[in-house]
Image (tube, rainbow, N blue to C red):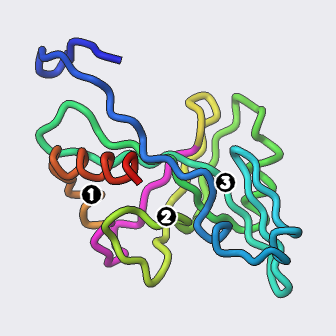
Amino acid sequence: MKYICECCGKEKEDWPAIVYNSPSPYLDISDEEMENAELSPDFCVIRYSDETCYFIRAVMVQEVNEACQDLDYGVWVSLSEKSYNEYVENYGNNDFEGGYFGWLANYLPDYEFDDPIPADVVVDNKTGRPFIYPHESFEHLFVKDFYSGISEKEAERRINKVLNK
């Protein structure tokens, strides 16, 4: 969709979001474990023999320096069972607001992930899916880039990388 940008006055086209259809751990489960997993557009539960993992779909917005738009990610975040259940119970309640601790559950392009990134999950059902914010104190290149922004060229390169898989 093309439009005239209010920021710069030029004709622009919205960038597509970088979207993940499932949390990364879902892609790694065996056929046997798949029988004990549930995936919907907004929720995922994986029951392993020794634990159960709970995930919800969320949005993350990364600033793009010197650009009129930001880069949106449709990602998954893992929650505790208690937080997951509260979120699911209030999913259809437009007045529900909440906040949770979670872990980013997707591997983003161009970053290495040895450990998951801790994040705050902010729920305001009036605005749609929850937003996640990585913990700024966590030392990881993505967290640094998230808070300092990336270049427009870098954002477009990431979008093209995902679209041209």
Q: Quarter of the image for the N terminus: give it.
A: top left
* Residue at the image point whose x is 60% and y is 51% from the top: 21
Q: Are marks 2 and 3 in contact (CB under 8 Å)?
A: no
Amino acid under label 2? Ala
Instruction: Write the start and end of the magenta stretch as one range.
Output: 130-142
Q: Residue 17: name its quadrant.
A: top left
* 155 over 124 or under it: above or below: below
Q: Which residue is mark 3?
A: 56
Front label number (1 vs 3)? 3
Query: In the current view of this chain or complex, which residue is farthest to the front?
Result: 164
Taking the spot 63% from the left edge, 65% from the top edge, the residue there is 78
Is 138 magenta? The answer is yes
**What residue did someone put label 2 on?**
119
Going from N to C along the chain, the mark reached first, 2 or 3, is 3
Is disc 2 surrounded by few (<14), some (14 to 19) or many (20+) residues within 10 Å?
many
Badge 1 crowding class, 10 Å Cα cut-off, few under 14, some 14 to 19, many 20 or more, is some
Left or right: 50, with 41 as reference point: right
Q: Is residue 10 left or right of residue 107?
A: left
Crowding near the residue tagged with mark 3, few <14, some 14–19, many ≥20 C-alpha atoms within 10 Å: many
The spot of residue 122 in percent (x, y) is: 55, 48
User: Within the image, what quadrant is residue 52 found in?
Assistant: bottom right
- Distance from disc 1 to disc 3, alpha carbons, whole Å, reads 23 Å
